Image (spheres, rainbow, N blue to C red):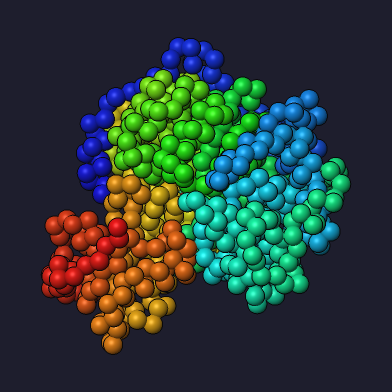
Amino acid sequence: MDADSTLSNLLNEDRRFAPSDAFAAAANVGADVYDVSDRLAFWDQQARRLQWRQDWSEVLDWSKAPFASWFVGGRLNVTESCLDRHVAAGNGNRAALIFEGEPGDSSTITYAELLAEVSRAAHAITELGVKTGDRVAIYMPLIPEAVVAMLACARVGAVHSVVFGGFSAEALRSRIEDAGAVMVITADGGYRRGSAFPLKHAVDEAVEDSPTVRNVVVVRRTGQDVAWSERDVWWHDVVDRQAPTHVCEAFDSEHPLFILYTSGTTGKPKGIKHTCGGYLTQAAYTHWAVFDLKPETDVYWCTADIGWVTGHSYVVYGPLANGATQVIYEGTPDTPHQGRWWEIVAKHKVSILYTAPTAIRTFMKWGDHIPAEHDLSSLRVLGSVGEPINPEAWMWYREHIGGDRCPVVDTWWQTETGAIMISPLPGVTHAKPGSAMSPLPGIGATVVDDHGEPVGRGHGGYLVLTEPWPSMLRGIWGDDQRYVDTYWSRWPGRYFAGDGAKYDEDGAIWLLGRVDDVMNVSGHRISTTEVESALVAHPAVAEAAVVGANDDVTGQAIVAFVILRQGHQEDENIVERLRAHVAHEIGAIARPKRVLIVTELPKTRSGKIMRRLLRDVAENRGLGDVTTLADPAVMRLISEGLSAGTAEDE
Ligand code: WT7
């Protein structure tokens, strides 16, 4: 992000939006919640929202910091909290999932039905040899079976690793290998932008030489032809014939629940590890408090895919633990028309909507008239997540989607934090457009300078978390040292989130984007190094440098500067080829928006690429300070070379 212009914009933002008196009076959480004086007592109380088989002896054991144990000795099966107890309480007929397929197919699955299906799937994966502690990769479109697959793993104590369906076969392969997965659950394909896309073939490629994967279980979603091998099993063949009841075991509070890979500053994604008790406690509490969930009457819709942490915490675990009724939608917002989302909101009377700034900015671009054609009067709370939301987008969301009556909650958190950390509370906070406002009760966060000293109001620096929290990551799969180095070494005792932030004069927190070499494209983290590695793996590329440039819709866009090898300079299609190559290596979300062919890259005397200068070029700004460049003429060379021939997307 361009921190300077952002900072000055923020200094001018003094609008505030308070909840209506009626909203505040009926809210789940009131202002007194901020009086928490004993954090551990607070979380102890929140953990009691869940169903435990055995109580804990201690709320937090931090003696092995930064490795935490929460609810020490407690035992639970997270699916009992998400399913069985709702059925036992007489809510079996409540809709759990209202599924909208992209082609227009729709179905409703009650809590009783979901419990039965998860039970069948739990039997099925057990029959196929999956044991407690085994890792299962899930590579699926957003269909009910994806939720069932995750919960079936949780029910038998297997650790799921969901890999976003847009990732490449290679990305899937490396994640399967890193986790040593014994099974992959996938589908033949899914629907997107009006047509069926394939998934199974990428799994075939990914597991071809896998020494660990014994079975690939395949949901039939599209009916398209798929290649078949001995390890493949149709979901309907193995799941449908199982018993609909399943007696489940309770696991230790610290039993691993899932791994989710996210990009770091190196080329190798990190397997973020989450466990059961603390994770579900914070996912459930925040979902109830931040969205003011009333499970009997609300219809909740989080638009995230299950391939991201938002889909884990706010599609699967949080909402189901709270007995919510929710919509899940398989496809894209403009299929078959740009009003699809608003049609879904009107059809199901959605009352809570949780989405990302990139989507909001896309709708702004499509025009006010599109949401205006639909009845959005059922909405009462709006949430945002994934990247900083600019005040204009926040205001548009509030006015054009929320009818100027719904509180907007801008929620800051990460794959690593597991659940929301910094956010307004809709019935309490007088929210400012674009600010995540303040840490939730029970959460410790502050902004520090280079020396780790807290900055005062009106100042910016780095966001840190000052206290352990229940849904914190428990480490990086297979690499404890990287966990310590990445998050806990910069300022001992403090978790470094990788984000820049600022306190305004009122003490509200404004997130300013990543401060490391991680880009945020449409709310998704992609490391510059990962894209650079993919590029230099191409035979035509000698050297590559990648930056995230500001983009009106996607937040940041990937811009690659590439030096070609001898003999490839004449290739006219090289830019397109390189873009396709990155998409093939990592996934379509990593396809560079622009590839700029250059003859030099700006480097410091020690050889480090000066991405700041490349960002200036990518954002068409005048050049900043070039005095630390080894060769100050380089930037002129780059700029001149570029005006001779650049290539851009769309
Ligand atoms: C990074 C985490 C949290 C689920 C989705 C992304 C950025 C996230 C906000 C927000 C400003 C935000 C941060 C963070 N981010 N939410 N409300 N305001 N920035 O999860 O892929 O782990 O990415 O997303 O930079 O570090 P993720």
Q: Quadrant of residue 648?
A: bottom left
Closest to the observer: 433 or 372? Answer: 372
517 up-or-down from 355: above or below:
below
Position in image of residue 72 (x %, y %):
72, 43
175 up-or-down from 437: above or below:
below
Closest to the observer: 505 or 325? Answer: 325
Question: In the rendered picture of this protein, how many numbered marks are placed on residues?
Answer: 0
Q: Quadrant of residue 237?
A: bottom right
Q: Is residue 240 visible?
A: yes
Q: Which quadrant is home to the C terminus?
A: bottom left
Position in image of residue 390 (x %, y %):
32, 38
| Side (left or right) of 238 relative to 7 | right
| Side (left or right) of 466 relative to 237 | left
Closest to the observer: 147 or 523? Answer: 147
| Side (left or right) of 479 relative to 458 | right
Position in image of residue 295 (x %, y %):
64, 25
User: Which residue is drawn at the image coordinates 49% and 51% (left, top)?
Assistant: 194
Position in image of residue 4 (x %, y %):
22, 46
User: Which residue is drawn at the image coordinates 69% and 59% (left, top)?
Assistant: 218
User: Which residue is drawn at the image coordinates 54% and 59% (left, top)?
Assistant: 197
User: Which residue is drawn at the image coordinates 74% and 56% (left, top)?
Assistant: 235
258 up-or-down from 314: above or below:
below
Q: Is residue 60 visible?
A: no
